[in-house]
Amino acid sequence: MVLDKVNSPSDLKALSEVELLVLAEELRSEIIRVCAQNGGHLASSLGAVELIVALHKVFDSPRDRILFDVGHQAYAHKILTGRKGVFHTIRQEGGISGFTKVSESEHDAITVGHASTSLANAIGMAIARDTLGEDYQIVSVIGDGALTGGMALAALNVIGEQQRKMLIVLNDNEMSISENVGALNRFFKELQIKKWVQDTEKWGRGVLETISPRLFNLVDRAKEAAKLVLHQENPFYAWGLRYVGPVDGHNLKGLIHLFQELKELDGPTILHIVTQKGKGYKVAEADPIYWHGPPGFDPEKPEKVSKGYSWSAAFGDAVTELAHLEPRLFVITPAMREGSGLVKYSQTHPSRYLDTGICEDVAATAAAGMALRGLKPVLAIYSTFMQRAYDQIIHDIAIEKLDVVLAVDRAGIVGGDGATHNGVFDIAYLRTVPGVQIAAPKDALELRAMLKKALELGGPVAIRYARDNVERVPEGSWPDIEWGRWEVLKEGGKAYILSFGKTLKYALEAAGDNPEVGVINARFLKPLDRELLEKLALKGYKLVTVEDHQKMGGFGSAVLEALSEMGLKPDIRVLGLPDVFFDHGSIPRMHREAGIDAAAILEALAQMGVRVGEVG
Ligand SMILES: CC(=O)c1sc(CCOP(=O)(O)OP(=O)(O)O)c(C)[n+]1Cc1cnc(C)nc1N
Ligand SMILES: [Mg+2]
């Protein structure tokens, strides 16, 4: 195998053109093989194989810095930069990350997982390079989806103003996780099908084989002379970028020529390449949405597998029905239609659905605008990605107490995606915002009850649920719920476990049939059920709070603050995630390590002198 000869990017530079083509196919096979066993970002990584081989052929990592936006498409980069032998551990317990990660390799220029950060990083690096009088290339690979992020577009503004030498490669496959959205995306489509571009590309490829330097001088001169025309065809003209493309992002030879040319140019250049998400694997080409991030599969007979009925699906079913009951309901997603369970909703209520692209800040403030003008927006948003909308929730939604429901998905530790994707800060940053109510349902019925009540109550309400499966409930189930009231699931003689959200299963497991230990579904965090809390404290019960969230600032903190305000000092233990980042791996193992599982609850109870058994 050619890949056997490549243990670092310098080995790749010695390969012939034919060997490089063979290498690309071997990389594809390896990516498919490992994703079949581990799951992972298959389609994105397959689409970026030629791009990555060409980059490492022409540029000189780690001296030259190659940045990958989101970093989920960089599997070939990982294999080519000394991690071939450990690639099979990707996203696994103790294995390498599924994204680029500075601490993992000198070839990983940025630690990522959230989209749209590479361009701001790149301009920062370019300024550092120039300020320190150093000399190296900076290349940022950004997908068409990631380019819909406000951070990316704002960074272009700075890059164009700074006019520092750097190369941006726009990897345009017309896909985010779903089909990509936005006016820029539409323009790219036009650009790609425009006859002028196809001819240019044919001519460009021909010329590139022979007299490429002349071509680029021609383009530059033509650009000056025909600014009006080009800037119609150059969407980046206003940002002061030199634009080249669109070109075939799977033409390895053409890409190598282009990179060799473009690396000589001063100032910022954006190369627009067109690729196919899932390239080289039929099922992934045919359905890049499912194969964006599949669980494991049989590589010889790849089939879609159902991941079970999730909280996201329960949410999607609920809002799809609710929209019939509440005509003002409007659902927004920042590019996570599938992940947030909204495919059916988007098909059933297309006129009351908005995918903003990867810009949670715009999604949150658009929700504010909708609420100001009489709609009842529900913003479906992952906890981790909601971090991008923190100021918008305060400034645009909470100050005026607007009727916006935040359906906060993936709350808690998420597993394979690791630290960049864990949803473990949202309680801390939401509960300090005046007027934002926070709830966590224990099952799909409570989710439906909370959604419906939240829409009736008005004001900003966050409903938080985990990356997990949940029992399906019949259509039309709309139970009532006493807002702000906790639910005693099991009486206890000596102690109570108060759980907020996903850890309720651990609480019930720990309590078992022990008559000493009661369990409370503390499903409301703001407002807390202070009346019940006061009663428990006054009766001298020992208390354990538990949550799948940072201990600092979480549910337990809220309970402690309330007890101190009431002047009560019960024997209490607060169980939550410690002050560290949790990388990718097994969720149960991380919960154990974090001290929020059933065993940890029992340990806490035992420390307080409660007679406990073993975890069943
Ligand atoms: C991995 C992950 O969390 C991905 S990958 C992806 C699509 C990226 O599209 P792009 O066109 O940039 O790349 P492509 O897959 O090659 O087409 C999204 C929306 N997400 C979720 C997401 C949402 N919101 C933010 C801020 N960051 C991320 N990473
Ligand atoms: Mg894309």
Image (cartoon, grey):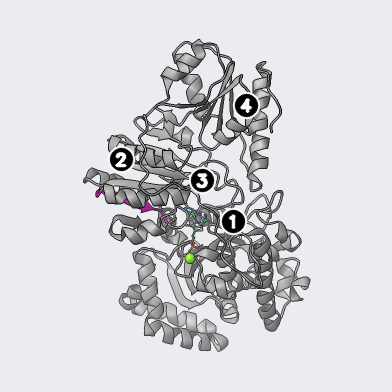
Amino acid type, mark 3: Val
**Residue at horizontal 36%, vertical 49%?**
319
Circle 2 residue = 455
Q: Tag 1 or tag 3, which sits nearer the N-term? A: 1
The quadrant of the picture occupied by the N terminus is bottom right
C-alpha distance separating marks 4 and 2: 38 Å
Q: Are marks 1 and 2 in contact (CB under 8 Å)?
A: no
Dot 4: within a 10 Å radius of its alpha carbon, few (fewer than 14), some, or many (20 or more) residues? few
Q: Amino acid at mark 1?
A: Gly
Q: Quadrant of the C terminus?
A: top right
Residue type at numbered disc 2: Leu
* Mark nearer the N terminus (4 vs 2): 2
Q: Which residues are magenta?
A: 327-335
For mark 1, what is the residue? 133
What whole-number distance in Å separates the C-alpha atoms at marks 3 and 1?
Answer: 57 Å
Q: Nearer the viewer, residue 613 or 323?
A: 613
Residue 332 inside the magenta-drawn segment = yes
Tell me the element at label 4: loop
Mark with earlier residue (4, 1): 1
* Marks 4/3: CA–CA distance: 23 Å
Instruction: Please name which of the two marks, 4 or 3, marks the residue nearer to the observer.
Output: 4
